[in-house]
Structure formats: C-alpha cells, structure tokens
Amino acid sequence: MDYFLELFFSGLTRGSIYALIALGYTMVYGIIELINFAHGEIYMIGAFVGLTVAGVLTSFGFPATSIMVLASMAAIVYAAAYGYTLEKIAYRPLRSAPRLSPLISAIGMSIFLQNYVMLAQTSDFISFPSLTPEFAFLDKYSSTIGSSDFLIIVVAAVVMVLLTLFIKFTRMGKAMRATAQNRKMAMLVGVNVDQVISVTFIVGSSLAAVGGVLIASHIGQINFFIGFIAGIKAFTAAVLGGIGSVPGAMLGGLILGWTESFCTGYVSSDYEDVFAFALLVIILIFRPSGLLGKAPIQKV
Amino acid sequence: MEGLKKSLLVSLWFMFLTLPIVGVFVNTIDDVVIWRLERVLYVGICTFFLSFLWRFMISKKEAGAKRDEETGEEQISAFGKILANPSFYYPLLAGVLVFALLFPQLFSMYQVNIMISALIYVVLGLGLNIVVGLAGLLDLGYVAFYAVGAYSYALMNLYWGVNFWVALPIGALLGALCGIILGFPVLRLRGDYLAIVTLGFGEIIRLVLENWGDFTHGPSGIANIPRPDFFGLFTGLSNSIHFMYYLMIVLVIFTIFIVNRLKNSRIGRAWQALREDEIACQAMGIDKVKTKLMAFSIGATWAGLVGVVFAAKTSFINPASFTFLESAIILSIVVLGGMGSILGVILGALVLMLLPEYLRAFSEYRMLVFGATMVLVMVFRPQGLVRDVRKKIDIAAVRKALGGANE
C-alpha cells in the first residue's frame, strides 16, 4: 500500500506539472488553432530566469523565503514577456497565412530559443538550488510524499482554480471564450482580438514558468533541452484531455502523470514513454476528440 | 522621428528580455555570479537597427499583399516567369542535370558526402509531400518510416547477411506496411489529433529501437553496415561514395517522375479533393479509407527506401538519428519549399540541408541562424519559396471550344 501511495503521489506531482504546461498549449490552441511548439522553450526559459535571479539574490545575501518568492515572480514575469514577444514576432504576421506556416515558424522559434539559451548560458546541466521550504508536518509521511511534491501539488491546484475563476468570471475571460468560439463574431461585437491573443500567450507562458521553477527546484538540475521533452509530454496531455478544453488539459495531465508513474513502478522504467503514447493512441481511437473535447459539428 | 522612438523602445525591450539569460551567468557549484552586461548592450544595439529593417520588410510585404488584392491576381516573380517559358526551362533543366552529373568530379569527397545527405532529404521531402502536401494529412512522425528502412537493412545484414540490393525493396515494402499499420487507427482523426498520434508513433518506434537491446543493440547502434556492391565494381572508399551519389541522383529523378505522375493521376486528384473537403469528396464517391491508406503507405515507401540508402551511406546507425527533430526538419522542407510544389520541395531540401553545413563558419551559431531563418522565411513568404501552381480550367474557353452548344 505504501508503495502504491508513493507512486500515486509521484504521479500526481508529475501530472500537475504536465497539466500546468498543457494549459498553455490548450489555451493558445483554443484561440488561434496553433500548436505552439515553442511553449516548452518558454517553460525552460522560466526555469533559467528563476535560476539566475535566485543566484544573484543569494550572492546579495537575501533570506531563503524571499529568494523563493522573488525568483518565482521574476520567472513568471520573464516567461510572460517572452511569450508576448514570441507571439508578436513569429505568429502575428502569419495570422492570415496557410495553416501549416505558423507551425513551421513555431518549430523554428523552438530551435532558435534552445540555441539562444545554450549559447548564452551553457550546454551542461546546471544544478538548481532547492527553493522549497521543508514542511515539518510532512515528516511522518516522508516515505510517500516529500515537501517539494506537496508544494507542487498545492501550487498547481491553486493556480488551476485561479485560472478557472479568471476564465469564468472576468471580462477578459469572457472575451477569451468568445474569441475561442468564433473569432470573427467576437470582433464584430467589439472584442479586441489582438489583445485577447496577447493575454492568452501571457497567461499560458506564466503557467509554464510556474511549472518550470517548481519542477527545476524539485529535480535539482536544468539544461537548455528540458523544454523539448516536457513540451511534447504536455502537448500529449492536452490532446488526451481534448485540445482547446481547459479542464481537459488538467485531466489529461493527471492521467498522463499517473500512467507514467504506475507503469514505471509496476512494469518497467525503460518503456515509460511508450506507455504514455500508447495510452494516447488507444484513447484517441475510441474518443477521436480527446476525453473532454467536443467533436466539431460539420455543416455541409 | 516616430521610427526612431519605436526602435529605441524595441531595443530597450530586448535588453530587458535578454538581461537574466545573456547578462548573468550563475555558477551554482562555486556560488559565483558572473556579470556580462556588455553583451546585453550589444543585443540592444543590434535590435535597434534590426527593428528598422523589420518594419521596412513588413511594410513592403503588406504593400505587396494589397497590390495582389487590388489587381485580383497573384504577382508572379521574375523567376516564376522564366520557369513558365519552355525555351528557358529546358536549357535550365539540362544545365542542372549536367552540373549534377559532373558534381563529384568538380568537388571534394566532403562536398559529395554532404550532397548525398541533401539528396536523401530531397527524396524524404518529396515522400512527405505526398502525405502532407497532396493529401493534407499532417504527419509529425515521418522519420519512423525512415528508421524502419534503415534498421531493416542493418538488421537483415547483421543476422542474415542480406545485401543492399535485396534490402532496398524489402525496406520500401516494410515502410509501406508500417504506413498502413499507422494509417488504420488514425483514419477517424483529423488535423492536429492526427499530428500528435503520428508524433507518438514515431517516438514509440524510436523508443523500441532504443530499449530492445538484445535485438537492435540499443542506443549504441549498429556499426559496419556494408556499402552497396555493384558486381564488384566501384571498390574503395572514394569510388563507392561516387557510386552512392549517382545512385541517389537516379533515385531522385525516379521519385520526381513518379510523384509528378501521381499528382495528376486519379488517386492524386482524390488526395487533393480529400484535402480540400472530406465530406464533399465522399459524396463524389471516393473511398476515404482506401485513399488515406494509400497516401500513408506510398509516402512511407519513399522513407523506407531512402532509409536503406542512409544506412548504407553512413555505415552506422543508432536511434539518435531518428528523433522528432528530424521529422520536424523534413516537414519544414515541405512547408518552407512550398507545399505541393515539387520544385519547391527540392529547393527547400537543398537550402535546409546545405545551409547548416556551409554555416559551419559560424560554428556554434549555426543552429541559431537556422531557427531564425525558418521563422523569417515563414513570416515573409508564408506560402513557401515556390508557390504550387494549381491547374486551372478556363470555363469560358471550354464553352467557346464546344461552340456554345451548352448555352
């Protein structure tokens, strides 16, 4: 039972991170129908900004708690800024282009950003300071759940609730839903679509940065390539849940996390990714639009 | 003055963006912080000037788009006009062919080797063009079929000593078979769901190759794959590389011929109809299942075929050659060159494959430039380098030819 719980929580931790990144994919897809391949790189840049800010603050002798807060804030702000700039340079000029063109520009951006960070920083793994405080009340359960796992799960849950509230109740959230349903109609009723798209990129990128800082401090090392794998996995999660659907991305992330964790624990760690993709294929065969996605109605 | 202010803001913004990544390096082992603020300044100065260029180019592109809209027709470039004229086209084609044939005599072995890789990508691009460009099925796992071809030769040679010429058709057949196996479950999926499943399929193949160590030798790969042998001729390294080069030229010409014939055949038109509108296409009596499976399997055949050539050329393969990045690059060849256009795909492959090689002067910056080029080409030429010319039928002219009988 202990082993099961350990796997359960490690799957939940992983799944929460996947879900955080998947939300960025799904929101962008919902609004402009683009697979933002550079999203994983935004996550990686978030982690790197967190690292440098934490390093600088440590050298100035700041206390540990304020380092954690300030580094995460900086990571979020920078990831949002990068996401905003990315959209302006690589996607906005392509609004009316053929469907595959923005995809290629996204792949190009992804290659560019990876190499940019590699050249500016380093191609080796760098160790990431553990920013997580130790929670004393978790000592009893230390075999099943660690402090950083706990922090990731709680932060992810809080962020997702906030996001849901934002989309449901704010003016901007309403505009986002309207744009996702029908961009032209939204424009006609006075929604500033360009602004909505920018905000979507900013929100999605911030979520990715939260995930990046949390997981980097959990694992303890980062390099310029981490965004790639995380991006593909999160994209899988988004599709699993039904791309374009916000609760779908959360559900997809968790399912993917648990699948990987249990398969690694009970079957074999070599084939972890094979299970993840096989699950995706099986689910899509039976539900071609993902778990919570709506099948598009075709009118002839 | 307005532009100056804008550029200043842009450069300040980029200096802000690059500050924590370029400006600071934290060595967490020794706890040393290295400041490199001068580099941030360079970034600022560069972006200040680049932003002028960017705005100029964007305004030029928009003016072009407006002109197209006003005149109601697309502007054909001078290059396009030359190509449309047969008296230029055929000599040009002959010139290219002569150059291609003389290439190994004129250039060093190193250059010939690079050219062989580029030609391999030409065939891959043309193969993927069938799936993506003609049939409109977004395939992000195309490299899986390439891997199937390469591994089928390597493994058959390792265990049974099968030679290159036998492996070539078998590799192509196995590729086609894998295309059908992948095709069946994804028939119901559309658009981006299809993309992710094909991506997953590609990754599954790679992971199996990596982890099934007893059979495939895992990540360490298979070495000493023999080069093709042609009745005992062309022995020695230099001769066999020249032979590979001419083999690829033949293969490229063969592929161009087949793809060109396919494009306007019954099945080719069915693919294009399916791409444009699935429902209307079914209403016209086209079997969707058969047509889609044909696209997947014919596309995969080329990948399997050149996979065998690739294994023979490098004489060493491992799963690291078949990552998602390869699929992405092959897709970029198709889109960058101009979807559906054969000439475009060839140009795209040559540009994308030769660019990183000749950018070696910039050594470590080459992938940075490569990524930036992809973005810039897409921003300024979203339809690709060469636009696919659709066949148009002038209805008025047809009526006239029929003598107005239908009016």
Image: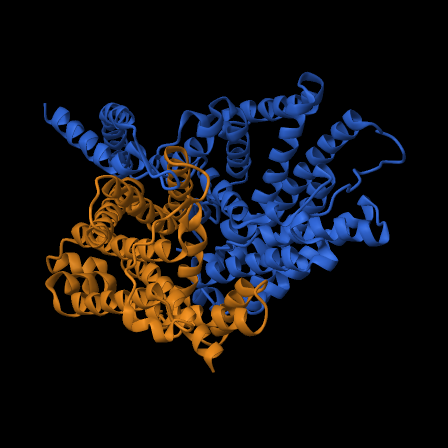
Looking at the image, residue A17 lies above or below residue A282: above
Q: Residue at image x 70%, y 35%?
A: B248
Up-down relation of residue B59 to residue B258 (above or below)? above
Task: Report the residue that reaches farthest toward the bottom.
Answer: A1
- Specify the colour of chain A: orange
| Left or right of B391 on screen, residue B290 | right
**Rendering colour mode:** by chain
Up the image or down, A228 lies above or below A281; here it is above
Residue A289: tell me if it is visible.
no
Q: Please state the horizontal and vertical placement of residue A122, each as a whole percent of the image.
A: 42, 36
Please state, as top left, top right, bottom left or bottom right, where the C terminus of chain B lies in the image.
bottom left
Q: Is residue A165 above or below residue B202?
A: below
In the rendered image, is residue A265 in sight? yes
Could you tell me residue A82's position as x and y percent? 27, 44
Q: Is residue B185 left or right of residue A86?
A: right
Residue at (11%, 63%) from the top-left corner? A171
Q: Colour of chain B?
A: blue
